[in-house]
Amino acid sequence: FQGDSVTDAGRDRSNPHDMGEGYPRYASAMIQDSYPDTGFEFVNLGISGTTLQSKGDSPYTAKDNYTIARQIEGDIILIALGTNDSKPANWNAAAFSRDYETMIKELRTGNPKAEIYCLLPVPAYPGNYGIRDSIIRGEVIPAIRKVAGKAKCRVIDLYTPMKGEGSKVPDKVHPNGAGHAIMAQHIYKAITGRKMPE
């Protein structure tokens, strides 16, 4: 799991195997329960406040976790970035698409067999901390879809199932436990092809 604070979700940063309290914990638990004999190993590499753009105010690609992400021989890589890119000081549509393409290429260089999933950000209601739902919805998401299509990556839409769920996003940006559970169910379904557990 690569992402920002929504992915990080209070994990112990000294331990990448700590899933935190968000959707990585829920999703990994669901997958482990469904496939108990496969020995899946999950790593949460989320870092709060990070941007996908290399010239954002806190680039994910400049963090140690990105180095780890490129070195891990994972079967599945999930990229959940773009929310912090929507801030006025960060957003640059051309740079976002270019840097997203670069990230995918770099991840595949180290791990060509990995299946990469591009996660669409959840809505903001309508925003906080400079994060803007209008940019997430109108520019970030279309850019992710276009890059994913070009790079032949799968898309997991977390925006649509969280639309209208403002009560589960108490600070208007970060989902609570109930919101993370919804996200995890959709990730589980996208990865496994199975009906989402209740």
Image (cartoon, grey):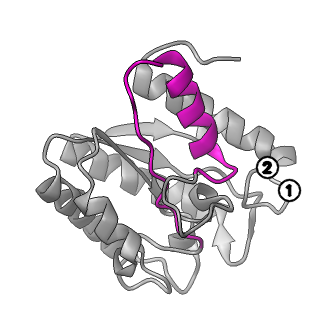
Which stretch did the figure color magenta? 19-48
45 magenta-colored: yes
Residue 50: image location, x then y, percent: 51, 74
Q: Name the residue under label 2.
A: 176
Q: Is residue 152 placed above or below 64 in the rendered structure? A: above
Q: Mark 1 points at which residue?
A: 170
Secondary element type, mark 1: loop
Look at 41% across and 77% down and name the residue there. 92
Amino acid type of disc 2? Asn
Secondary element type, mark 2: loop
- Figure quadrant of the C terminus: top right
The quadrant holding residue 49 is bottom right
Residue 158: image location, x then y, percent: 57, 41
Residue 155: image location, x then y, percent: 39, 39
The Cα atoms of the two marked residues, 2 and 1, are separated by: 7 Å
The quadrant holding residue 98 is bottom left
Q: How crowded is mark 1: few (under 14 residues within 10 Å), some or many (20 or more)?
A: few
Q: Are marks 2 and 1 in contact (CB under 8 Å)?
A: yes
Q: Main secondary structure of the magenta part?
A: loop
Look at 43% across and 17% down and name the residue there. 193
Look at 27% across and 38% down and name the residue there. 75
Q: Does label 2 or label 1 sit earlier along the sequence? A: 1
